[in-house]
Image (tube, helix red, strand yellow):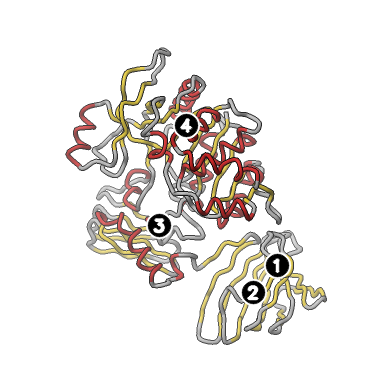
Amino acid sequence: MYAVILAGGSGTRFWPKSRELFPKQLITITGAKTMLQNTVERILPLVPIENIFVVTNELHAVETCKQLAEYGFNPDRLIAEPAGRNTAPAIGLAAKILSRKTPEAVMGVFPADHVVEDGDSFLNALREAESVALRGYLVTIGIKPTRPETGYGYIKKGPPLDNGGGSFQVERFVEKPDLPSAKRFLEHNGYFWNSGVFLWKVSTILEEIKLRLPELDACLKTLASTVAESQGKYSYRVLGAKGKEIYNSIASISVDYGIMEKSQRVALVPASVRWSDVGSWNALEEVSAKDASGNVFSSNVVSLDCSGSIVQGNDRLIAAVGIKNIVVVDTPDALLVCEKNRSQDVRRLVEKMNEERRTETKVHATVPKPWGSYTVLEKRANYLLKRIEVLPGEKLSLQSHRHRSEHWLVVSGAAEVELDGRKIPLARHQSLDIPQGSKHRLCNPGDAPLTIIETQIGETLEEDDIVRYEDLYGRS
């Protein structure tokens, strides 16, 4: 069995913790691991790491490879999309690539940003679904509902299949219902939440795409033929120029709408597990512990007479008095406050901020990079102060700046600086000026993290004032 993890979501409803360049699947929601890492760990007992593929946006490819390195994930199993086109194109491209070697293998599709508890029951449902998929069905995992939820799509089960197991034909798919309908579905006992987890043979899904989405099918062969290894430290798969042009022109369509709701060979395997798509901040009530007053608070919250609220932060103390049914999310550069029943509208709020060109929707104050991270400490009209952290053995690109000079002070670790052809070692407390226009590169040759404080001075202090000449990560 193969697994394709769809990790291309933007997670806008989880702003400000989720940002465009660091979306929901790459952050921690519950526990110590990110949602992507939790997804991989959930299926590893059934699917070996060498059979796990990930489809994500090019912007997130390097960070995805970094997060999965501890599991032995091979970067050539990552397929980088030039743009998001919903689930059908991503699944179709992955299936076309798999069909070259394993057309009759079962391919499971898993969202990267869901929470699933009771892993053994989930794995048992996947094993049942695999056996049904081998018979030529498109199988969806249905979650037994526990409440009249209006935020999920539903599946109504039909007659049982004739395999003697716990699988059924699908009578119909139902869009997100209103509350009275959701209550009827819960009482009926024949409706299930649509989890977005699917299993089918590679050949089966490609046949269905050819039948139901002929325009997408016409593109897949050419798209797959343009796939090549990226340049840089992580050799993930990217589309060539022609492939990117085609992919960007493909209609955005979900596999649910394009295939599952129209196909005549869809089967349902129910799973009785605690599951959430963690679609908004409200979902923390489903996946996190609550106090006696129904609050979900992070450890840095001190409260008095609060109830039914969600308050999340980082290191800074948050003091709350008398709030009820409120969501508060604090990050170093942005604060969200909203009524709990309006948490779905955070997406609209992000759209408004994008219209106003607010950078806070795109990056955090601390920006992860392939080599480490940087944090903007202070920015004024003609200077900018940064903390730069470089991982052991890593180096930044060889670059220059047209509009600014820089001053570097080492505060921990040891650095080696390439400056206009010279190599200059810097120890703790030592500093160096980087003149405007000079070719330079910061390296960490040691075994410990390197931290420097960078002061930029110039009339323009933007990240795009970088000319790259060499780069380990293919960005030059």
Q: Which picture quadrant has residue 220?
A: top right
- Identify the mark nearer the N-term, 4 or 3: 3
Report the residue at 37% width, 63% height from top.
350
Report the residue at 63% width, 55% height from top.
241
Residue at the right extreme? 422
Q: CA distance from mark 3 to mark 1?
A: 30 Å
Could you say whether the residue bearing mark 4 is in a helix, strand or loop?
helix
Q: CA distance from mark 1 to mark 4?
A: 45 Å
Q: CA distance from mark 2 to mark 1?
A: 10 Å
Residue on which disc 3 sits: 12
- Identify the mark nearer the N-term, 2 or 4: 4
Q: Are marks 2 and 1 in contact (CB under 8 Å)?
A: yes
Residue on which disc 1 sits: 397
Q: Which picture quadrant has residue 99?
A: top right
Q: CA distance from mark 3 to mark 2?
A: 28 Å
- Identify the mark nearer the N-term, 3 or 1: 3
Point out the frontmost of discs 1 and 4.
4
- Identify the mark nearer the N-term, 1 or 4: 4
Q: CA distance from mark 2 to mark 4?
A: 46 Å
The number of discs equals 4
Say few, some or many: other residues with alpha carbon within 10 Å of mark 1 (under 14 / 14 to 19 / 20 or more): many
Residue 436 location (% of width, % of height) = 68, 84
| Image quadrant where one finds the N terminus | top right
Which amino acid is tagged 2? Ile
Residue on which disc 2 sits: 466
Residue on which disc 4 sits: 208
